[in-house]
Image (cartoon, coloured by chain):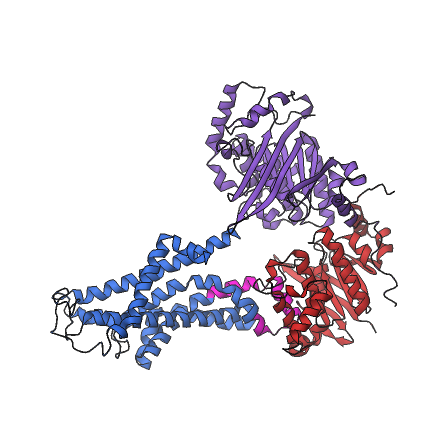
Chain colours: A purple, B red, C blue
């Protein structure tokens, strides 16, 4: 079991009109490489803030404390299955305190790390224009400011794929979807445009978009909500990220499409050996997909455990309340059936 | 006499030169005090039916009879007067109110428009409405954007019941709420139904909720009725393809019950 | 309060606000500081500025005090500019809201009328209107508004078209609200911000149009206007250029002040929208 990211004492505060609102408090969480981890909670629980913090997408006005340390495989070998990773836990502290803002492969000598860091700088101008888009930009800058801040040294787009709730907001409405995906490939994998477009077709096939060749030239408004989300997922996994974050990625879709997208995510994560962070308000949906569930409430992590334990033997009253509030197909009717004739 | 009788309702849209039927020859009826659910995937026409019944959009064909009158022939002032009997609660309670409104203004409007209460009497009626939906009366001066989502949906329900309607269309009215709030809102709605004999046209994509609160269900697919009947019977053993797909897709929590 | 502070923090807005404050002070104090007829003869004709400290800006062709004229001219410029802009915004907002909300034939008719007004240059329209009806302050205000209401109308209509599809408008219909009440109570107030963002440009344009009309002798003859002063000075432009330059600078600073302050307001509200 290898830890991919280790979150320690993470706190996020938003400043709004002079007052400060704590969105996350004292979060300690290890994300295990290759796992499917669900973060569930109601609105205001901080679950989306956590996703943004991990992806390095928090707005400038947010203040963060604590650390997010990335402990993982070398950059190029993103597809290496987690099981063959060297055990690197002893050097974790070292990486955490590194202020270089670069992703340091622990097994590689330091010189290589510097090379990587230089490489990263050259991409950094993209950050501004690309943040908020599916592929996102660079997430390493803040590492230099202070060692106490979270060390975002994975590259969003290449090392982290992010799928948002609203695919219309994350896709460029005036760019053909093939170009949008090819752009991610071109930017992060350094392929030429012809290869990038070929890869885009493969990706559209992988997300099971009907007729990928013509879909390449389609614009987002010509697709249904479910199809747009498939495209957003294709863009998110285009560069072969280690971590896929799905932030309420199925909440805007109807039940049938939701089930299809969840099945798609499950398959892609398994095929590529990705780690999945599945953010949801729906405990039943999370339980169907995830191996572990973290329950958030009011900015705090209140319970973390295996799906079976959370569902069948929750230790916290709040978790039990969430489970009881689920109205499944076997729920006792709320309706007084005699009411109609009374 | 049925409360609402919808016959051969049809609504077509043209998109890119093609004509699509959003609602295709749909007929159903509702009795007073009944909850009828319309369920189906997105694009199945359930929200379009809701808007047709509310006369927010006009159909291309069919008939709607509400409380014994031909509802589609009503225009202008008579239609506005009748609207007090047929109300709606929207999915997103924030979008459903003027962003500049206060709770008091939102509740004052229907009382004023339908002459339910005189100007001097209205503050008391507003307080009573707020209490009826489980809110404190001192919430009245607050702005809509200041209160929580659950409170907003209660205010929406208070506005809907202000004119003593016989039918309320609930368009995904609990889908955007947190699960803990959803249960409370559902029991408030059922409580109101028991006491005031209000019928609900319950639009939802969540079969679990439909099964728990509806008497009857209509499953829609591509604008047509795929299946209909007793809510529990249909959902426990769906016959149509879309019914089977919806049931299969519903997230299930496999708890070991003691 | 914090909005005002944010507004004053931007240097352009601060400069604009100061210019406008000075202008308003001039307009308001004109009859206090210089009671009596501003067109009365105060001294020898064509006295250059800074020669006689009782007439610091000198006198014009007829021996009238330029400083007094400048103060009273500020009044006319501001009054006409603001009144014309307000009239244009009200007409524009009402027409745009009706067109956008009603749709169909009403929209078609109102927008063709808007087109008709827009195709005629605003200044020509004002010129024609004043020459037919005759120059007076009220007529000048209406004349300027006639040429400027189309912009606000188009913006209001576009905004209303998007707002009328919102749930809360459907909600207002469901509770049986009268369409006119929905249009003007529910829709219009939410459609106003982008229309108001135009107001600084409209005020500045209205002040310039008023000056141009006065320059052509179509202003209210009973009032001192900066445009009229420039026209007066034109005949002696070679010998006494200051007679045209002084009111010209006043005009320039006014338009600049209005524009900068307007930009500042747009900036502050944009920042607010970005934050929320």
Residue A246 visible from this viewpoint: yes
Residue B145 image point, x, y percent: 59, 59
In the displayed image of the protein, which residue is found farthest to the bottom?
Answer: C133
Instruction: Give the vertical position of C88 relative to C1 (above or below).
Output: below
Instruction: Give the vertical position of C174 relative to A56 (above or below).
Output: below
Q: Does C214 appear in magenta?
A: no
Towards the viewer: A27 or A140:
A27
Residue B138 image point, x, y percent: 64, 65
Residue C260 image point, x, y percent: 35, 58
| Quarter the N terminus of chain A occupies | top right
Instruction: Quadrant for residue C181, please give it.
Output: bottom right
| Quarter the C terminus of chain A occupies | bottom right
The overriding secondary structure of the stretch rendered in magenta is: helix
Left or right of B79? Residue B215 is right
Q: How many marks?
A: 0
Instruction: Quadrant for residue B67, please give it.
Output: bottom right
Q: Residue at x 67, y 66 (%)?
A: B137
Instruction: Give the vertical position of B163 relative to A99 (above or below).
Output: below
Towards the viewer: C249 or A299:
A299
Q: Does C164 appear in magenta?
A: yes
Segment tinted magenta in the rendering: C154-183
In the displayed image of the protein, which residue is found farthest to the top?
Answer: A109
Residue A211 visible from this viewpoint: no
Towards the viewer: B20 or B153:
B153
């Amino acid at each position: 079991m290898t830890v991919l990211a280790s979150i320690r004492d993470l706190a996020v505060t938003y400043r709004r009109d002079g007052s400060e609102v704590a969105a996350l408090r004292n979060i300690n969480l290890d994300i295990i490489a290759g796992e499917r981890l669900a973060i569930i909670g109601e609105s205001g629980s901080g679950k989306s803030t956590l996703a943004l913090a991990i992806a390095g997408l928090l707005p400038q006005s947010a203040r963060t404390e604590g650390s997010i340390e990335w402990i993982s495989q070398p950059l190029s070998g993103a597809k290496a299955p987690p099981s063959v990773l060297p055990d690197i836990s002893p050097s974790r502290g070292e990486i955490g305190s590194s202020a270089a803002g670069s992703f340091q492969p622990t097994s590689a000598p330091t010189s290589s790390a510097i090379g990587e860091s230089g490489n990263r700088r050259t991409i950094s101008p993209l950050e501004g224009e690309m943040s908020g888009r599916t592929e996102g930009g660079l997430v390493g800058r803040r590492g230099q400011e202070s060692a106490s801040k979270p060390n975002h040294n994975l590259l969003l787009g290449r090392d982290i794929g992010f799928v948002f709730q609203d695919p219309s907001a994350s896709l460029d409405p005036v760019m053909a979807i093939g170009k949008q995906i090819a752009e991610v490939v071109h930017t992060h994998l350094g392929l030429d445009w012809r290869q990038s477009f070929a890869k885009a077709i493969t990706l559209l096939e992988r997300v099971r978009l009907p007729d990928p060749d013509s879909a390449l030239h389609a614009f987002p408004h010509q697709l249904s909500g479910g199809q747009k989300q498939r495209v957003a997922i294709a863009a998110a996994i285009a560069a072969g990220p280690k971590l896929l974050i799905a932030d309420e990625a199925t909440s805007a879709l109807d039940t049938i499409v939701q089930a299809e997208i969840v099945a798609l995510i499950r398959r892609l994560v398994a095929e590529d050996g990705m780690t999945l962070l599945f953010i949801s308000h729906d405990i039943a949906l999370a339980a169907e997909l995830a191996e572990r569930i973290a329950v958030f409430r009011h900015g705090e992590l209140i319970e973390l455990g295996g799906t079976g334990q959370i569902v069948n033997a929750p230790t916290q009253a709040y978790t039990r309340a969430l489970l009881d509030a689920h109205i499944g197909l076997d729920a006792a009717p709320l309706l007084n059936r005699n009411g109609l004739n009374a | 006499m049925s409360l609402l009788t919808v016959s051969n309702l049809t609504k077509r849209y043209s998109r890119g030169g093609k004509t699509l039927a959003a609602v295709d020859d749909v007929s159903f009826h509702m009795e007073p005090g009944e909850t009828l659910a319309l369920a189906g995937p997105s694009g199945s026409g359930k929200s379009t039916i809701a808007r047709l019944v509310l006369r927010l959009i006009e159909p291309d064909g069919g008939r709607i009879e509400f409380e014994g009158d031909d509802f589609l022939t009503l225009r202008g002032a008579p239609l506005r007067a009748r609207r007090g009997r047929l109300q709606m609660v929207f999915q997103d309670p924030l979008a459903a109110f003027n962003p500049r409104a206060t709770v008091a203004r939102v509740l004052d409007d229907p009382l004023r428009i339908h002459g339910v209460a005189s100007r001097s009497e209205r503050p008391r009626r507003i307080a009573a409405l707020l209490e009826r939906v489980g809110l404190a009366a001192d919430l009245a001066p607050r702005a809509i954007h200041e209160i929580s989502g659950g409170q907003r949906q209660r205010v929406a329900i208070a506005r809907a019941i202000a004119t003593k309607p016989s039918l309320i269309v609930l368009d995904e009215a609990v889908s955007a709420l947190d699960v803990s709030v959803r249960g409370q809102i559902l029991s408030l709605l059922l409580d109101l139904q028991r006491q005031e004999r209000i019928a609900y046209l319950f639009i939802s994509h969540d079969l679990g909720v439909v099964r728990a609160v509806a008497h009857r269900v209509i499953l829609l697919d591509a604008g047509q009725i795929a299946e209909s009947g007793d809510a529990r019977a249909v959902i426990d053993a769906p016959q149509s393809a879309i019914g089977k797909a919806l049931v299969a897709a519903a997230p299930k929590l496999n708890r070991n019950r003691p | 309060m914090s909005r005002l502070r944010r507004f004053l923090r931007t240097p352009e807005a601060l400069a604009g606000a100061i210019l406008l404050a000075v202008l308003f002070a001039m307009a308001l104090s004109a009859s206090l500081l210089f009671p009596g007829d501003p067109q009365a003869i105060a001294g020898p004709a064509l006295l250059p500025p800074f020669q006689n400290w009782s007439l610091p800006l000198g006198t014009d062709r007829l021996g009238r005090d330029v400083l007094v004229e400048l103060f009273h001219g500020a009044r006319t410029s501001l009054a006409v500019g603001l009144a014309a802009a307000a009239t244009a915004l009200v007409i524009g907002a009402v027409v745009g809201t009706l067109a956008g909300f009603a749709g169909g034939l009403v929209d078609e008719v109102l927008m063709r009328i808007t087109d008709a007004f827009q195709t005629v240059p605003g200044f020509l329209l004002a010129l024609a209107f004043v020459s037919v009806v005759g120059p007076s302050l009220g007529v000048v205000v209406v004349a300027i508004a006639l040429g400027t209401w189309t912009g606000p109308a188009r913006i209001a209509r576009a905004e209303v078209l998007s707002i009328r599809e919102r749930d809360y408008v459907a909600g207002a219909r469901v509770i049986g609200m009268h369409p006119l009440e929905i249009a003007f109570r529910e829709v219009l107030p939410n459609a106003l911000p982008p229309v108001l963002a135009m107001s600084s440009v409209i005020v500045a344009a209205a002040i310039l149009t008023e000056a141009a009309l006065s320059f052509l002798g179509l202003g209210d003859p009973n009032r001192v206007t900066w445009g009229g002063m420039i026209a007066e000075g034109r005949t002696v432009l070679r010998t006494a250029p200051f007679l045209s330059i002084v009111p010209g600078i006043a005009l320039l600073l006014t338009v600049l002040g209005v524009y900068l302050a307007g930009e500042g307001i747009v900036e502050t509200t944009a920042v607010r929208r970005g934050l929320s």
